[in-house]
Structure formats: C-alpha cells, structure tokens
Image (cartoon, rainbow, N blue to C red):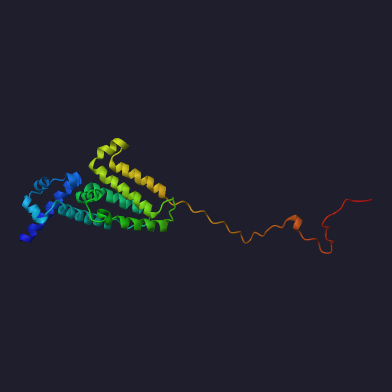
C-alpha cells in the first residue's frame, strides 16, 4: 500500500473517531487522548494531520456538512409541502444515525464553525423548497416560507439535542424522539395545509330568461296608461 494511501486512511480513522467524540461530548468535553485510543493511532499521527483541536473540529465539520448535502441530494424531489416535511424527516434520521452529521450540528450550535457552518448545507435548500410549496399550493396560514424554515430549523436543533439525551425527552413528552418528531411535523403540516379556495359564483343558465315582475308588465295595445297616482272616488 502506498504511503499516501495509508496516510489518508489514518486521517479518515481519526476524523471518524473525532466525529463520535464531538457528537457525544461537544467541543469542550472532547478529549484528544480518547480520540487516538478510539482511532488506534498515536498522538503524533493525530498532530501530524491536525495540528490543533480546532483544526480537527474543522475537518469533522467539513465531513458532516458533506454527508448532509449527500443526504439532501438523495431525497426524492417531489413537489409540495409534504415533500418538504419528508426531507426534514430524512435529515432527522441522518442526524440520529450519522455521527459526523450530528457532530457538525453540535459544533455549529456551540459556535465552533465558520460562518453558518452546518446550517449552510441544508437551510438554503429547505427555504427554496418551502417557497416553491407556497407558490404551488397557495399556502396561507399566517406564516411565510422564511418563518416556516426557521421553525423547522429549530425542530431539527431539538432532534440533535435529543439525540444525546433521548430519555430526557421521553420523560417530558411521554414519547421517544422519533414519535415526538412525527407528531411535531404532523401538527406543522396541519397548520400549513392550504385552505380551500372559495368556489366561483355559478354563471346563469342561458335558457333561463328573467321573469318580469307583474307591476312591470307592459299595458295592452291601445289601452290607456294607468295614472301615476289615483285619487279617491267622488260622486
């Protein structure tokens, strides 16, 4: 095996071990010694690839955002609000099951990311999908696509936080993270469901001619026109 290939494999092992560590313990709680033990490498190998803890966190952030974009690209591009909520469910599943994605989300939440970090990998696409749904389904529930994107972002932040302490959420809601998320998205879907548009007024039938009022009927030919105001009869 070429030296360059071995070096890349070592780097990937370190990033995977660091992803699990950052996802579980956050930036401040992460131990480089635990990472090298988990990755099966020496501290010298770690510092060769990543001279600082911050550089390692950046690599984990990059791995998580790349994985997130791949997840979102793999989501079926169906139109409408239902497809948007399905995308959120797919990303929520990836948050719970992919350590690099959860680590990137946590590092961003804790402020250890450049610019918007992990959010840049999915929030713009979510907002665009919501704007299309608003246009296609004429949604009108007192919300805007930007507000709905913000709400869904907060829901996903809750998914990331609950992934580290699922029992705490179960104690509060009686449900696990999966059930709570499904209920939250169901409620949001009901809130954003398009209201039924009023039916246009029915056009009058061409065969139905207007019936004249008796008082408006024309006088017979040759008959004197009735007086506008008849006075009382006199002897």
Q: Position of 18 compared to 154: left or right? A: left
Q: Position of 126 compared to 199: left or right? A: left
Q: Position of residue 173 (x, y in %)?
A: 32, 37
Q: Nearer the viewer, residue 111 or 79?
A: 111
Note whether 143 is above or below 5 in the view shown: above
Number of numbered markers: 0
Q: Nearer the viewer, residue 167 or 219?
A: 167
Q: In the displayed orientation, state which residue is furthest to the bottom.
A: 222
Q: Position of residue 178 (x, y in %)?
A: 29, 43
Note whether 162 is above or below 14 in the view shown: above
Residue at 8 percent of width and 57 percent of height: 7
Q: Position of 18 compared to 71: left or right? A: left
Indicate the quadrant where residue 181 lies. top left
Indicate the quadrant where residue 132 lies. bottom left
Q: Position of residue 124 (x, y in %)?
A: 31, 57
Q: Position of residue 134 (x, y in %)?
A: 41, 56
Q: In the displayed orientation, state which residue is furthest to the right.
A: 235
Residue at 17 percent of width and 55 percent of height: 59
Q: Nearer the viewer, residue 197 or 118?
A: 118
Q: Quadrant of the N terminus?
A: bottom left
Residue at 26 percent of width and 44 percent of height: 161
Q: Position of 217 compared to 44: left or right? A: right
């Amino acid at each position: 095996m070429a030296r360059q290939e071995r070096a890349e494999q070592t780097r990937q092992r370190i990033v995977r071990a660091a992803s699990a560590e950052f996802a579980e313990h956050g930036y401040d709680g992460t131990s480089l010694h635990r990472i090298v033990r988990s990755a099966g490498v020496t501290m010298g190998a770690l510092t060769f690839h990543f001279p600082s803890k911050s550089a390692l966190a950046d690599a984990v952030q990059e791995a998580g955002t790349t994985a997130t974009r791949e997840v979102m690209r793999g989501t079926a591009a169906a139109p409408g609000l239902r497809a948007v909520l399905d995308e959120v469910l797919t990303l929520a599943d990836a948050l719970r099951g992919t350590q690099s994605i959860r680590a990137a989300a946590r590092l961003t939440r804790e402020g250890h990311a450049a610019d918007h970090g992990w959010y840049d990998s999915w929030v713009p696409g979510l907002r665009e999908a919501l704007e299309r749904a608003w246009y296609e389904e004429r949604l009108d529930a007192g919300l805007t696509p930007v507000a709905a994107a913000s709400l869904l972002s907060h829901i996903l932040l809750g998914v990331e936080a609950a992934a580290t302490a699922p029992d705490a959420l179960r104690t509060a809601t009686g449900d696990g993270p999966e059930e709570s998320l499904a209920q939250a998205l169901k409620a949001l879907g009901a809130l954003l469901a398009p209201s039924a548009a009023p039916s246009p007024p029915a056009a009058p039938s061409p065969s139905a001619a207007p019936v004249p009022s008796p008082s408006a009927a024309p006088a017979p030919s040759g008959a004197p026109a009735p007086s506008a105001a008849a006075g009382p009869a006199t002897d």
